[in-house]
Image: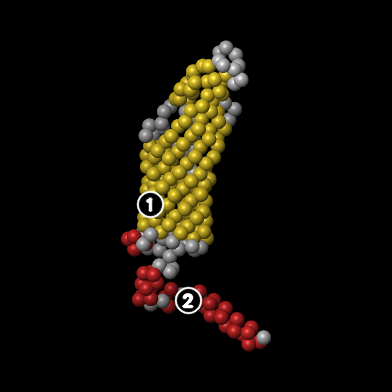
């Protein structure tokens, strides 16, 4: 039993020592070999992003070997609701794109370009002229090209910060909706102001996210 415990202790001590080796103890040739094998690069990340336009959603990223491990592909997905007494908004957001890291380890500072799609299912309520309560629905799809700058921390558990701007087509100031009486047959047409959507302006989309997750 003592021999077994001693063996286990030696193994764990060896592993702990190996993990504590300072970078200066690794020769340049060894470092190049490690980089070429990609063993010190965490290729895949999965986590959450919180901010705009995501609000809160899932984020995926994969670091490719392109340009000496500097090119990463990402995908973001989220869905959320923004409601008040007169309007219901069901929002979904997706974005696909590329992050270009300034270093070659899949971490640190990077610039990114993404192609986003913000979809809104809008429901409006209003009192009709002939009495009764009217309900009308419509859809709004907004596509954007997003330019971002971000920083991702190293380690298995990472944090990420992103800021940027999305260029969109013109967002309408008003939306015309046909209202149908709830529980009746009366209809009416009215024009509503486009509801406020977090981060969305008349000509663009603000991007500001905080993310965290696991890399492996």
Residue occupied by mark 1: 98
Disc 2: CA contacts within 10 A as few (<14), some (14-19) or many (>=20):
few
Give SS at disc 1. strand
Residue 88: image location, x then y, percent: 55, 31
Disc 1: CA contacts within 10 A as few (<14), some (14-19) or many (>=20):
some
Quarter occupied by residue 140: top left
Residue in the foreground of this view, choosing between 37 and 148? 37
Residue occupied by mark 2: 21
Give the CA distance from mark 2 to mark 1: 34 Å
| Farthest bottom residue in view | 3
Apparent side of residue 150 relative to residue 157 in the rendered image (left or right): left
Q: Which mark is residue 193?
A: none
Location of the N terminus (image quadrant): bottom right
Quarter occupied by residue 152: bottom left
Residue 43: image location, x then y, percent: 44, 61
Give SS at disc 2. loop
Say if 3 sits above or below 133 in the image.
Answer: below
């Amino acid at each position: 039993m003592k021999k077994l415990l001693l063996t286990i202790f030696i193994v764990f001590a060896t592993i702990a020592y190996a993990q504590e080796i300072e970078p200066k103890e690794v020769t340049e040739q060894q470092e190049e070999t490690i980089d070429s094998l990609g063993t010190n690069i965490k290729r895949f990340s999965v986590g959450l992003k919180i901010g705009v336009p995501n609000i809160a959603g899932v984020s995926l990223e994969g670091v490719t070997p392109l340009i000496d491990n500097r090119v990463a592909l990402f995908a973001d997905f989220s869905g959320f609701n923004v409601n008040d007494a007169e309007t219901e908004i069901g929002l979904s957001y997706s974005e696909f794109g590329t992050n270009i890291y300034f270093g070659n380890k899949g971490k640190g500072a990077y610039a990114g370009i993404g192609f986003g799609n913000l979809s809104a299912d809008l429901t409006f309520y209003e009192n009709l002229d002939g009495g009764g309560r009217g309900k009308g629905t419509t859809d709004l799809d907004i596509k954007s090209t997003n330019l971002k700058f971000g920083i991702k921390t190293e380690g298995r558990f990472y944090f990420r910060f992103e800021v940027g701007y999305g260029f969109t087509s013109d967002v309408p100031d008003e939306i015309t909706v046909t209202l149908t009486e709830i529980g009746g047959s009366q209809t009416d047409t009215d024009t509503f102001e486009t509801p406020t959507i977090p981060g969305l302006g008349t000509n663009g989309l603000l991007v500001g996210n905080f993310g965290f997750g696991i890399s492996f």
